[in-house]
Image (cartoon, rainbow, N blue to C red):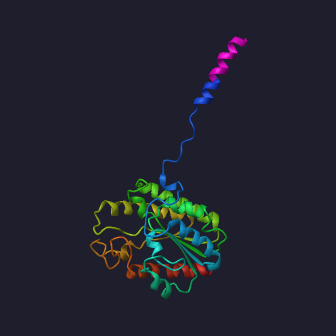
């Protein structure tokens, strides 16, 4: 009998040794990672500054995102360049204590890393405004993502926000239009992603705000008076954004 058991035992052991390991997620947009791209500012320094100042600010509104959010200005300051959104932040949204968690060149996976490394810890904001995903359409030190992958990344961010600040109202912004022409492949990718975000917002019990019609000309072109380089907003662009947020934030303040 023992001669029969020995080969069977060897087969079992061999099977254990060659069993496949669980696969890592294929979607890079949901895999937290720190700085990926070189920009004009100190990515890790900005993260550390946020950790130092966030408890002092005690924000009512937290903005999370990439360079478009970064250029709202506010706290912490968007160094070294002036922020086209600073004036609008002060005049239109000045009734709220705000914290700016916008980082130039960030993708959804960078935001996930930053949340996991303390940027929301201990805060009690009334609202969290999320605008992220445009850089997930770009090549670089991470591959471009599909529309479904980007939507999954935004949903994962909402999950993390719920876990860190469960009483905050989440406001998901549709990704702002890029490129001049509506037929541009990047614009089409952004549009495809935005079509998925209302379902994400419903599942996350979040508000969804799409400013695309307000930012585009009647023929679908993106004017430079709204987005100076066909991506980053001008003061007029930030005013459109602020005006849309005001009634939602007013409702959040009473919660």
Question: Is residue 6 covered in magenta?
Answer: yes
Viewer-side residue, 114 vs 170: 114
On the image, which quarter does residue 210 sit in? bottom left
In magenta segment, residue 152: no
Can you give x and y, in whole percent of width and height, for residue 99 in the image? 56, 76
Q: Which residue appears farthest toward the right when viewing the image?
A: 1
- In percent of width and height, residue 180 lies at 29, 69
Examine the image and state in which quarter residue 126 appears.
Answer: bottom right
Q: In the depicted view, which residue is nearer to us: 62 or 56? A: 56
Residue 11 or residue 42, whichever sits in front: 42
Seen in the picture, residue 18 relative to 140 is either above or below; the reply is above
Q: Residue furthest bottom?
A: 91
Residue range corresponding to the magenta coloring: 1-11
Quarter holding the N terminus is top right
Question: Which residue is located at x 38 percent, y 82 percent?
Answer: 236
Q: Position of residue 201 (x, y in %)?
A: 52, 65
Residue beneath the point at 44% across and 61% down: 37
Main secondary structure of the magenta stretch:
helix
């Amino acid at each position: 009998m023992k001669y029969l058991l020995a080969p069977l035992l060897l087969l079992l052991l061999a099977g254990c040794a060659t069993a496949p390991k669980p696969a890592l997620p294929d979607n890079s947009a949901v895999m937290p990672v720190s700085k990926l791209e070189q920009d004009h500012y100190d990515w890790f320094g900005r993260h550390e500054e946020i950790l130092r100042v966030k408890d002092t600010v005690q924000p009512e509104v937290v903005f999370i995102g990439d360079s478009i959010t970064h250029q709202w200005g506010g706290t912490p300051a968007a160094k070294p360049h002036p922020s086209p959104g600073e004036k609008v932040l002060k005049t239109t949204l000045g009734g709220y204590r705000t914290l700016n968690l916008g980082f130039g060149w960030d993708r959804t996976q960078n935001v996930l890393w930053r949340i996991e490394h303390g940027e929301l810890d201990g805060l009690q904001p009334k609202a969290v405004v999320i605008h992220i995903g445009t850089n997930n359409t770009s090549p670089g030190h991470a591959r471009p993502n599909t529309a479904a992958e980007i939507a999954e990344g935004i949903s994962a961010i909402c999950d993390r926000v719920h876990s860190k600040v469960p009483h905050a109202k989440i406001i998901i912004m549709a990704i702002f239009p890029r490129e001049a022409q509506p037929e541009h492949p990047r614009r089409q990718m952004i549009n495809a992603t935005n079509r998925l975000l209302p379902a994400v917002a419903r599942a996350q019990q979040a508000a969804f705000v799409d400013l695309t019609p307000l930012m585009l000309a009647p023929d679908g072109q993106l004017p430079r008076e709204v987005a100076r380089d066909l991506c980053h907003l001008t003061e007029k662009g930030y005013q459109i954004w602020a005006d849309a947020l005001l009634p939602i934030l007013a409702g959040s303040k009473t919660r």
